Image (spheres, rainbow, N blue to C red):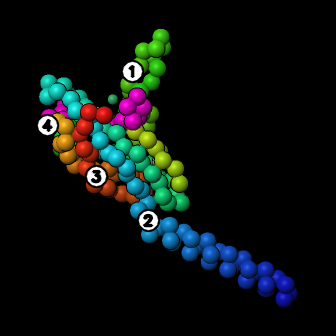
Amino acid sequence: MKRATFLLTLLLLTAVGFTAVACSNNEEEPITVADPWGRTSPSAAANGAFYMMLTNNSNADDTLLTVSTDACGVVELHEMYDKGDGVMGMRPIEGSAIPVPAGESAELKPGGMHVMCMMKQIQFEEGSEIPITLTFENAGEMEITAVIRDN
Ligand SMILES: [Cu+2]
């Protein structure tokens, strides 16, 4: 009986320990966005794209659900894929969402996943700063600023 009590206490202490770790992790932003940017494109170009690194610092899986910005008429989440014969195409990501698993990162980069900006409303000039709202399933809304540059 005494031994059982000891084990139970140990179990409880361990649980408290884990909770403390979880709490200290939560002091950090659950999701961080690194280096949001878009490539310069001529004003005649109807479309542009944004790239960034999404990192989930929390203990729970999250998902980027939507992206919105006044700079684009329509925003979609796209990925590049091999059409065959070395020809690359792009298409909306299945489920129109980007999973960001707990403790992992999702990279949006040229040649891969990207935020597709259709019907550009403004010029994408070097140094332009474009406010963008990201909406995550768990983390909710996040305001970021994408910088326009050549590469
Ligand atoms: Cu695209």
| Residue 11 vertical position relative to residue 72 in the rendered view, above or below | below
Name the mark on residue 122.
Answer: 4
Three-letter amino acid code at disc 3?
Ile
The earlier-in-sequence mark between 3 and 1 is 1
The Cα–Cα distance between marks 3 and 1, rounded to whole angstroms, is 28 Å
Residue 62: % across, % down: 46, 52
| Secondary structure beneath label 3 | strand
Pair 3/1: label in front: 3
The earlier-in-sequence mark between 2 and 3 is 2
Badge 2: few (under 14), some or many (20 or more) residues near its Cα, within 10 Å? few
Three-letter amino acid code at disc 2?
Glu
| Quadrant observed for ligand 1 in the rendered image | top left
Is residue 84 at all visible to an observer of this figure?
yes
> Bounds of the magenta span?
109-124
In the picture, residue 10 is in which quadrant? bottom right
- Residue located beneath label 3 in the image: 144
**Residue found at x 21% / y 29%:** 41
Three-letter amino acid code at disc 4?
Ile
125 sits to left or right of 15: left
- Residue located beneath label 2 in the image: 28
Residue 4: % across, % down: 82, 82
Residue 103: % across, % down: 53, 54
The Cα–Cα distance between marks 4 and 2, rounded to whole angstroms, is 34 Å
Number of residue marks: 4
Q: Is residue 113 magenta?
A: yes
| Secondary structure beneath label 2 | loop
Along the line of sight, the residue nearer the viewer: 8 or 19: 19
